[in-house]
Amino acid sequence: KHPIHFCQIMLFFRSNLYFQNKVITKEYLVNIMEYRASHSTPIQWCQDYEVEAYRRRHNSSGLNFFTWFSDHNFAGSSRIAEILCEDLWRNPLQYYRRMKPPEEGTEISGEPSVGT
């Protein structure tokens, strides 16, 4: 039997009009084969948004943050967790690389550069 590990994704929020949580957490059990969602913090919706959130969750099969967060059977959930835990967390700077500015006289997006 393969050992099981635990991965916890914690997201922190400032005060907002939509939900009351300051921190929401999604937990995964991790083994050699997969990431399996095991728990997520219930979102405490503000009164004006609770009905809308319920309607969208039950009438939409589209991909959005709250579908991923709340639905433990969501098809892409394990892949998202793998990217966050294995790639982004371990090496975040690769997502913030600055590209070299174009050399003078080269084209940007198919448009000629304007020299001074």
Image (cartoon, grey):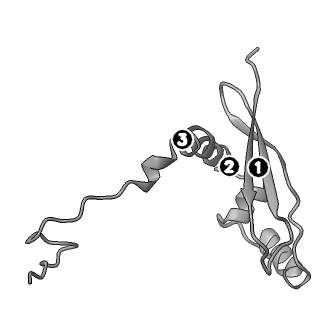
Q: Which mark is residue 87?
A: 3
Provide the secondary structure element on which disc 1 rests.
Answer: loop
Give how far across and how far down residue 7 sits, in percent: 73, 38
Q: Residue at x 51, y 47 (%)?
A: 92
Quadrant position of the N terminus in the picture: top right
Give how far across and how far down residue 37 sits, in percent: 77, 43
Vertical placement of residue 46 versus 99, above or below: below
Residue at the front extreme of this rendering: 116
Q: Residue at x 68, y 63 (%)?
A: 65
Viewer-nearest residue: 108 or 79: 108
The residue at which mark 2 appears reads as 77
Q: CA distance from mark 3 to mark 1?
A: 22 Å
Q: Does residue 41 show up?
A: yes
The residue at which mark 1 appears reads as 73
Q: Residue at x 19, y 65 (%)?
A: 102
Q: Quadrant of residue 48?
A: bottom right
Tag 1: Cα neighbours inside 10 Å, few (<14), some, or many (≥20)? few
Provide the secondary structure element on which disc 3 rests.
Answer: helix
Looking at the rendered image, the disc whose residue lies closer to the viewer, 3 or 1, is 3
Mark nearer the N terminus (2 vs 3): 2
Mark nearer the N terminus (3 vs 1): 1
Q: CA distance from mark 2 to mark 1?
A: 7 Å
Q: Quadrant of residue 112?
A: bottom left
Tag 3: Cα neighbours inside 10 Å, few (<14), some, or many (≥20)? few
Quadrant position of the C terminus in the picture: bottom left
Q: Which mark is residue 63?
A: none
Q: Are marks 2 and 3 in contact (CB under 8 Å)?
A: no
Q: Are marks 2 and 1 in contact (CB under 8 Å)?
A: yes
Q: CA distance from mark 2 to mark 3?
A: 15 Å
